[in-house]
Image: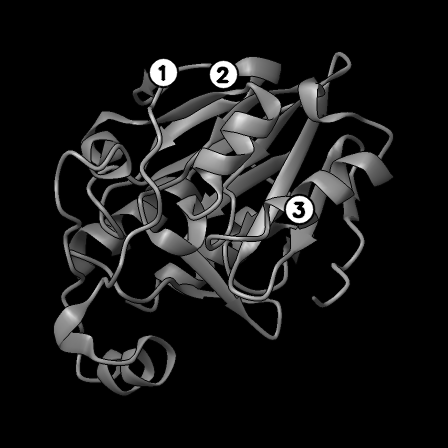
Amino acid sequence: MDKPLPPEKIVEGLYLIPLPASNVHIWEWDGDLSVFDTGVPGPDHAILAAIDVIGHAADDVAEIVLTHFHRDHTGSAAELARRTGARVVAHHADAAIIEGREPPLPPRLTQLERPLAEMLLGDVANLPGPQPEPVRVDRLVEDGDVIAGGGQIVTIPGHTRGSIAILLPERGVLVTGDSIATSDSAPILGPFNINTADAVNAVRKQAQLNFDIACVGHGHPIVGNASRKVLAMIRSF
């Protein structure tokens, strides 16, 4: 088993765990923790190791917030919830898939995305592929809801119907899920969306917010004037 990478401090109280398939973030507030996404099935040990490195224990995790249902973001949610006792938070439009009560919706691949999907995901006819262990969603959130630690929910359907971002206004940070990715630390539209037009509108919505740093699901964070950089990117669409 590869040794997990140490957590990277983004700003005071916010840490990035760069897992092989996607990014996980830890938000520290009032002695407790929130975990934003959980990676593919298996790396719960890496998340717990990172929690130990920053001076916390598993039972300090109060919430696991899932930005959308895809398996590279919810894969370790069930095991992490068992090991921490944390409540799971997600948008109602993705909750039935996360809980295993409905089948996952496949993305509508563009011509440019199809070769990338085949390379990363294999047989695109079977997208989105085997799903992780279902986990109960303890809290359903909507646009504007406030979660533990003061994070604000921003609904951004497009990548999935129930995609959400989390704004941490006191830190000037937006956690974008897969609505935004980065290439060479510059923002790009996240791929593999169920509706590309809605995904573009979701990025426009986020660009109207005020944030200095964007923490994305795939790629390096956008640091410094992040909302302006996202706005400049989306104006090209």
Residue 15 percent across, percent down from the top left: 73, 42
Report the residue at 80% width, 54% height from top: 6
Report the residue at 17% width, 56% height from top: 194
Label 3: element kind:
helix
Label 2: element kind:
loop
Residue holding disc 2: 147
Which quarter of the image is occupied by the C terminus? bottom left
Residue 201 percent across, percent down from the top left: 25, 49
Q: If you read the primary sequence from the N terminus, does the residue marked by circle 2 or circle 1 appear first?
A: 1
Q: If you read the primary sequence from the N terminus, does the residue marked by circle 3 or circle 1 appear first?
A: 3
Please identify the quarter of the rendering in which residue 171 is found: top right
Residue holding disc 1: 139
Position of 80 with respect to 164 (left or right) is: right
Q: Amino acid at mark 2?
A: Ile
Residue 209 showing in the rendered view: no
Which quarter of the image is occupied by the N terminus? bottom right
The residues tagged by marks 3 and 1 sit, at their Cα atoms, a distance apart of 24 Å
Q: Are marks 2 and 1 in contact (CB under 8 Å)?
A: yes
Mark 3 Cα within 10 Å, few/some/many (few <14, many 20+)? some
Q: Nearer the viewer, mark 2 or mark 3?
A: 3
Q: If you read the primary sequence from the N terminus, does the residue marked by circle 2 or circle 3 appear first?
A: 3
**Res. 45 mark:** 3
Position of 168 with respect to 30 (left or right) is: left
Report the residue at 77% width, 14% height from top: 31
Comparing 204 with 34, the one in front is: 34
